Amino acid sequence: MLYAEDLACLKGDRLLFRGLSLKMVPGELLRIAGPNGFGKTSLLRILCGLAHAEAGEIRWNDRPIGSDREAFHRSLLYLGHAPALNDLLTPLENLRFACASAGDDVDEDRCVDALVRIGLAQQLDLPARVLSQGQRRRVGLARLFLGIRRTLWVLDEPFTALDVAAVADLAMTLSDHCDAGGMVILTTHQDAPFAKPPRVLDLAEVAV
Amino acid sequence: MSRALGPFGAVLRRDLLLAWRGRADVLVTLAFFVVVVCLFPFGVGAETNQLRSIAPGVLWVAALLATLLSLHRLFAQDHADGTLEQLLLSPEPTVLWVVAKILAHWIATGLPLVLVAPALAMLFDVDQGALGILILSLTLGTPILALLGAVGAALTLGLRGGGMLLALLVLPLFVPVLIFGAGAVDAHLSGTGADAHILLLGGGLLGALALAPIACAAALRIAVD
């Protein structure tokens, strides 16, 4: 379970939000909404422990995430704005590196399967610099299709640059993950066909 | 064991592969080293005794500048493409992969300098017996430069004009390494023996290896915040 209490975020000298609390229980899908510049990405980065909150506390399974960082990050899968691809490596090399550096023991066949499933069968051996924006996005998202046991998925704009079929496929995967007891927090500006409508947290409504 | 080696091995393998695929960058650093060393005889004149006496200092200063030139590459690409965030979210200890990155960086940029240094030393007519000491001092000294430089690179990550700031930040820290590195060869040539210098460099390397990755990891966390 993820608890965030009384979070505040300061960017420069601008207060993006304060007094923000949220609670995630297994099986829940939360969509962070709000116009550009209202701190959606900042909130996700704070929840992951990448950025520092000006005030407030985040607890994972009743322990502050700072006190047991490794256990928290073992349960967390974060995909940020940047797809974490190196242009000189192939999608397969990028994906295998992402798994190995995160401490996930995933063999090559499963990585190939995930990349084929997400529609990159033709691009397995090409350097990432020749891929289109949508294809780069997909390489990052391929980690979601590996079946790694990580409870909390935090996704920043996962649907950007994807075509309709890929959006549907991803939405279904996210719904399945929630049905299996996982949790998903995401930001998006578009409507995705989730199995059941997600809970929405609108940052425009959080009082500053 | 294999799990602890996971991120370390993965980062080391990937960075060496990247260094190989982007080997033009590595060659530029090496060429810079060679060119800087070769400039000195033009500047100070081709008097053999003088060249012989300045050779260790020239080689060391050139190695130091070449290291400095390549330092900004250490984390910049990973920072720009989001890999650094993913690495910081790895449940494995941060220092582990930080050491792997620095080691890969040293193998790609520091080791070639160590290997070509003897050939350049012979251009300066350095005594053959001193070449071993030169290689040893560079082998112990350039990793210290890489470790200290990595802290500077992490601290200046994402800053405008970071390259200049990086130089200002780490060059003073490089001074002791320069003194004992170049001093080792001089001490050997003057007959006092280079043991003390080499031991100090070795101690410095162990100290840097113990402390620099921790500082570097903390600086990287601040850099992505």
Image (spheres, rainbow, N blue to C red):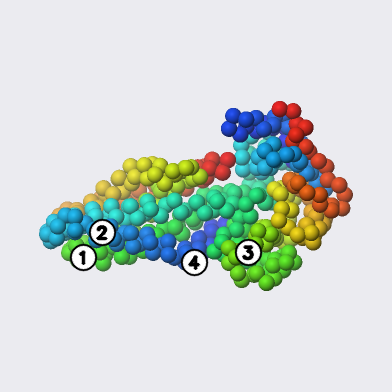
Mark 4, other Cα within 10 Å: few <14 / some 14–19 / many ≥20: few
Query: Between marks 3 and 4, how big is the CA–CA gap?
Result: 18 Å
Query: Between marks 2 and 3, how big is the CA–CA gap?
Result: 42 Å
Mark 3, other Cα within 10 Å: few <14 / some 14–19 / many ≥20: some
Using the image, tell me which numbered label, if any, was put on residue B21: 4
Query: Between marks 1 and 3, how big is the CA–CA gap?
Result: 48 Å
Q: Earlier in the sequence, mark 1 or mark 4?
A: 4
The amino acid type found where label 4 is placed reads Arg
Q: Earlier in the sequence, mark 2 or mark 4?
A: 4
The amino acid type found where label 3 is placed reads Leu
Q: Which chain is disc 4 placed on?
A: B
Mark 2, other Cα within 10 Å: few <14 / some 14–19 / many ≥20: many
Task: Identify the image quadrant of the N terminus of chain B.
Answer: bottom right
Task: Identify the image quadrant of the C terminus of chain B.
Answer: top right
Query: Between marks 2 and 1, how big is the CA–CA gap?
Result: 10 Å
Q: Which chain is disc 1 placed on?
A: B
The amino acid type found where label 2 is placed reads Val
Which residue is located at x 69 percent, y 36 percent? A38
- Residue A117 visible somewhere in the drawing: yes
Question: Which element carries disc 4, helix, strand or loop?
Answer: helix
Looking at the rendered structure, the number of numbered marks drawn on it comes to 4
Quadrant of residue B128 in the image? bottom left
Question: In this view, which residue lies farthest toward the right?
Answer: A196
Asked if badges 2 and 4 are on one and the same chain, I answer yes
Q: Are marks 2 and 1 in contact (CB under 8 Å)?
A: yes
